[in-house]
Image: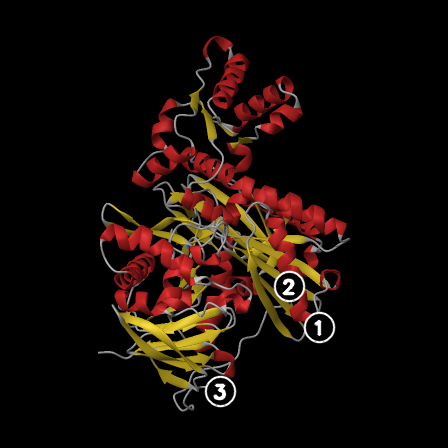
Amino acid sequence: MDNLINIDNGGTLTDICVVTKDGIAFTKTLTTPTDLSECFFKGITKASGEVFDEPDLPALLNSTRIIRYSSTQGTNALVERKGPGLGLIVEDEALIEQLSYDEQSTGLFKDLVGERTVVLTKDSGQDELELLNAVNTLTTAGAERLIIAANDPATERSYMKILLKRFPRHLLGSVPVLFSWEFADDRNHVRRIWSAVLNSFLHPTVERFLYSSEHRLRAHKVKNPLLIYRNDGASSRVAKSVALRTYSSGPRGGLEGTRALAEQYGLQHVLMIDVGGTTTDVGSIEDLQIKTDRYGRVEGIESSYSLSDVRSAGVGGSSIIEVKDGKITVGPESVGAAPGPACFGFGGEKATITDVNLLLGILDPSTYLNGELNLDPERSKAVITATVAEPLGISLDEALLEMEKAYAQAVASAFTPHIKDKDSTALAAFGGGGPMSACLAARIAGVKKVLIPRLAAIFSAYGISFSDVSQTVRVDVTGQSQDSLDSAREELLELAARAMFQEGYSLADCELDWRTITDNADGTTTENQEAGLSGTEGASRVLLELTATYVLEHPVLEGDFRSDGPDAQASSHRSILSAPEQRDDVPVYDLDAQQAQAHAHGPAIIEGPFFTARVPEGWTFTVSDAGDLLLEDVTT
């Protein structure tokens, strides 16, 4: 088997996982936000050193079948509201009000679009002049990207012709224009326009990376494609990818990995908490199913695309912890990788949970990132003293404990609404910060079981290994007869064959999944796994959909948890702050040095590959045959 490279680009760290014929090789590197292609290639170079005896980027690239890439950059941009100013042109003034239909949509519209809107009146046949004036008005007001949303597709096409005729292509390209009907053939105006707005906001992050990375890959004479991992759990070539579908694509990889863990260990309901640098992403696996919404939500806003139900909260390892109005707050602002937490030594002047865990004694300053980055506790001490302890009039020790408590509460608040039954729910905690805070957050939420995979530090990148290459095509069959439906099926087969050919695969080698999607008159949507019209009478819209999937190789998980194993063996001890002016001597366990089924009780620290897990007092842990951790709260 040729190598498969999976990359999950986060706000602070970028994870690289290489699936080889001999197993899994992985590493991490600091994200380079000014040029994401830099950490992309630096990470692959580091990973080549794990695959071969020494780093050899050309050798790894030339022995790789595909590279699959996901990113949380778009998610982070939305959480922090860092992106281009958008301008919106519509034909119906009422739509502007309808786009702000609740508190969440009102706030997001204000942040992304604000007052940069124009309503076309179409008076006196001055469509062309009015449209041109609208474009000039919005760009003068600071719009860096435009969305044009007419009431029907034909009108939008006429607007497109006007702009192409009146503006030189190079000038029009400097302020990209997205036409809503061209982007999403959705008769629900509010949903379609919001989809176009969100895609326009997310697109620059994807665009900048892809341009630079593809250029550098060509320089290395790489023939195999760079694939973009999507929120629906599949991958596709760059030209076939939509920015909106990359939203929370990294966490979708984590969901795929979590589903595999749930199946392996027989868990009925598992909540994924992927704690990265900027966000905590939460998703649910119930009865081995990933919850997916036909009209997926982004920041609570319904879109025209099917998306997995991943909720992102602005709390992560690099989230700023500070004092506002006399209270400790966590996020959503993040220091990212640059300047990063104060302890990184890159000039950061804001406190984060990474600084807190360093001073608590949980993190060893010499082993962070497997010893690749030496942390500076003095910088953390100075920042926390200045920004939290002194403003609150408390000691440094008291500040650290209060900050830890506030952070655990913030993480718990991210997943608590998704708990159905505390007794049957388990947390799967991963990402750089998940294993350190999972048990504290779980106890707040009343969850008694936490699963930490051995690959926790790069688990979303690993989860991408369960993805395939697919394309979905659809056609409107509302009101059609059975004969017309047969013709639509043939049309979709031709479209799917063309799409998969562009991906590099024959339709004959793909699995085909047909379904009928019905938008009912009452506003609900139903799906039928068969391509038929039965039960669609009276529907406002009926779509026939075909998904073609080329199945790639997937990892096979092994292992279980038993209670008959040996005692875990500590390799050292660490002094952990437990109360003001009180530190306890806590054992430290090297995960990879433990026997299968080894177990112990907390308080304890577990050092895994690129991650540190905290086992509080009252919790126990067991190591599976595969090196995964099961932590259980045994307090009554």
Q: Is residue 475 visible?
A: no
Residue 474, position as x, y percentages in the image: 56, 45
Mark 3 or 1: in front is: 1
Say left or right for 528 vs 173: left
In this picture, residue 445 sits left or right of residue 162: left
- Judging by the rendered image, the residue that carries numbered circle 2 is 46
Which mark sits nearer the N-terminus, 3 or 1?
1
Give SS at disc 3: loop
Q: Relative to 272, is 557 above or below?
A: below
Q: Is residue 359 above or below residue 240?
A: below
Name the spot of residue 544 as percent of width and height, x first: 53, 47
Identity of the residue drawn at 31% across and 68% down = 440
Element type where label 1 sits in the image:
loop
Furthest-right residue in view? 221
The image quadrant of residue 275 is bottom left
Q: For residue 53, which numbered disc appears in the image?
A: 1
